Amino acid sequence: MSRYFANIYQSLSSIWVGMNITLKHLFTPAITLQYPEERWEMPERARNQLFNDIDDCIGCDQCARACPVDCIYIETEKTDDDLGLTSKGTKKCLKVLRFDIDMSLCCYCGLCTYPCPTECLVMTPNYESSVYDRTDLLYKYAKPWEYDQKSEPAPESDDVPDAEDTPDEEAKEAASAD
Ligand code: SF4
Ligand code: SF4
């Protein structure tokens, strides 16, 4: 008989404890974030998605050598062409033909960003980089085609089509004639 009343007491006391917790949270403000309408604000210097401002990259390879998991792939080519300067005034002597980062291997240590002499490789606060296909995590930053465009000779003045001869202008003329 005493066991019967002990069970009733235990049940009621656990309901009381549970309801107390429920009531406490009923009157405290919710901390649920309504993602994606709301987003966490990342702390200063958060290490998330890497970004390379390729226009400032001199292809020195220091970032790749610092990477503990070898997930930065760089291919460069020496050239006598004038490639100009970086935004900080460093002369560019190498064509950066490939600059890929495999973020599926990256451990977000940030070690690659410290030795970069032009400070073009940075960790951004962007943490929304989920993909369905792992191969989509290979980020390609190099723009090798731009070197070809720069080395092409400027067209002769005779080769440059007159503005009136362009398809858009012809279409406009045709429309106004109707
Ligand atoms: S953050 Fe670390 S693991 Fe990722 S690319 Fe840079 S050095 Fe490599
Ligand atoms: S360390 Fe900086 S400049 Fe050198 S290859 Fe890496 S990103 Fe480019």
Image (spheres, grey):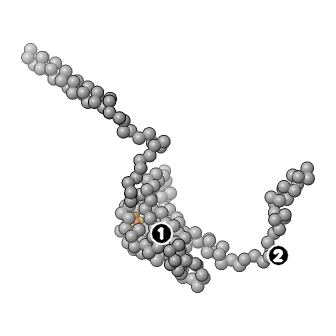
- Identified at 43% across, 53% down, the residue is 127
On residue 133, the disc is: none
Report the number of numbered marks.
Answer: 2
Determine whether the beta carbon of the residue marked 1 sits less than 8 angstroms from the nearest atom of ligand 2: yes
In the image, 13: left or right of 148? Answer: left
Question: Is any atom of residue 17 visible in this view?
Answer: yes
Q: Rate crowding at label 1 as few (under 14), some (14 to 19) or many (20 or more) other CA atoms within 10 Å.
A: some
Of callouts 2 and 1, the N-terminal one: 1
- Tell me where residue 84 appears, x and y as whole percent: 58, 78
In the image, 99: left or right of 151? Answer: left
- Tell me where residue 93 appears, x and y as whole percent: 53, 81
- Identified at 50% across, 78% down, the residue is 90
Res. 6 image quadrant = top left
Q: Quickly name the residue at label 2.
A: 158
Tag 1: amino acid: Cys
**Up-down relation of residue 165 to residue 13 (above or below):** below
- The outermost residue toward the left is 2
Q: CA distance from mark 2 to mark 1?
A: 40 Å
In the image, 137: left or right of 158? Answer: left
- Identified at 36% across, 35% down, the residue is 30
- Tell me where residue 139 appears, x and y as whole percent: 50, 62
- The outermost residue toward the bottom is 80
**Up-down relation of residue 1 to residue 133 (above or below):** above
- Tell me where residue 66 appears, x and y as whole percent: 38, 72
Q: Quickly name the residue at label 1.
A: 120
Determine whether the beta carbon of the residue marked 2 sits less than 8 angstroms from the nearest atom of ligand 2: no
Q: Rate crowding at label 2 as few (under 14), some (14 to 19) or many (20 or more) other CA atoms within 10 Å.
A: few
Tag 2: amino acid: Asp
The kind of secondary structure element at disc 1 is loop
